[in-house]
Amino acid sequence: SQTIHQWPATLVQPVGSPLSLECTVEGTSNPNLYWYRQAAGRGLQLLFYSVGIGQISSEVPQNLSASRPQDRQFILSSKKLLLSDSGFYLCAWSTNTGELFFGEGSRLTVL
Amino acid sequence: KNQVEQSPQSLIILEGKNCTLQCNYTVSPFSNLRWYKQDTGRGPVSLTIMTFSENTKSNGRYTATLDADTKQSSLHITASQLSDSASYICVVSGLNTDKLIFGTGTRLQVFP
């Protein structure tokens, strides 16, 4: 069966520090991969999605970047965090039917 | 503009009672509608996914309905349990696109 792992679960970082959130999927090959951000009282906002290794599409201009170095690995990064980067980040993957499966999320607090 | 609106924003019910959550959307052309359950601090988990031709779909005590003509969906929870306390998110997908439109969710609290 397919599983998705996302880490770290929680992270407290100072403003200006770098960020790396990792996500891996097991049990499937060539999945579509996504990074979402969820702010309190708002719907999930798509940040990046990838249909293959090295293929990244950005939905919203921001202080973040994404990379897909391997088929089932998706990384969300920042060189210098801003206060506004605080939030709950969710990695997800989808099947060829479009069904979406989410990771457990990463709570980022920027101080 | 493609939008998904959910109501109520929050809901409190007693254990054992039924409740219905609403989702209205303006996404067109429409492909499918999904309901997710999200426990606090966790990732959303899929409850149901419905296509244009489906009117009702059940998953245990959860029953989703879809009226594609009026662009409305509901999620009915029967005999609520404490573990039903969560946010319920409605997500709509348009045709010929992989973009998903997320509602802001309904926060359900079930008290004993």
Image (spheres, grey):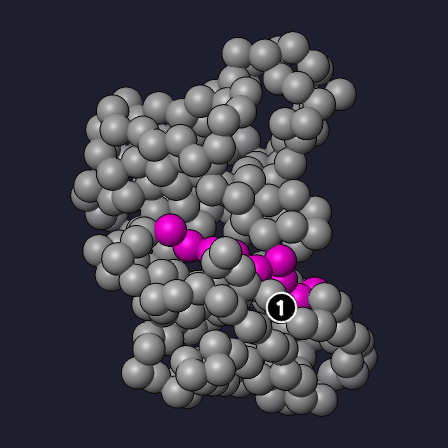
Relative horizontal placement of residue B68, taking residue A89 as reference (left or right):
left
Camera sees residue A24: no
User: Toward which corner of the image does residue A51 lie, by quadrant?
Assistant: top left
Relative horizontal placement of residue A54, taking residue A87 as reference (left or right):
left
In the depicted view, which residue is nearer to us: B64 or B84?
B64
Work out whether B81 lies above or below A4.
below
Percent across and percent down for residue B112 are: 80, 79
Percent across and percent down for residue A65 are: 44, 22
* Residue at 53% across, 60% down: B3
Q: Residue furthest front?
A: B1
The residue beneath circle 1 is: B6
Q: Residue furthest left?
A: A29
User: Toward which corner of the image does residue B93 lie, by quadrant?
Assistant: bottom left
Work out whether A14 lies above or below B62.
above
Work out whether A34 lies above or below B107.
above
Asked if the magenta segment contains residue A16, the reply would be no
* Residue at 36% across, 61% down: B94
Q: Which residues are magenta?
A: B99-108
In the depicted view, which residue is nearer to us: A104 or B70?
B70
Asked if the magenta segment contains residue B103, the reply would be yes
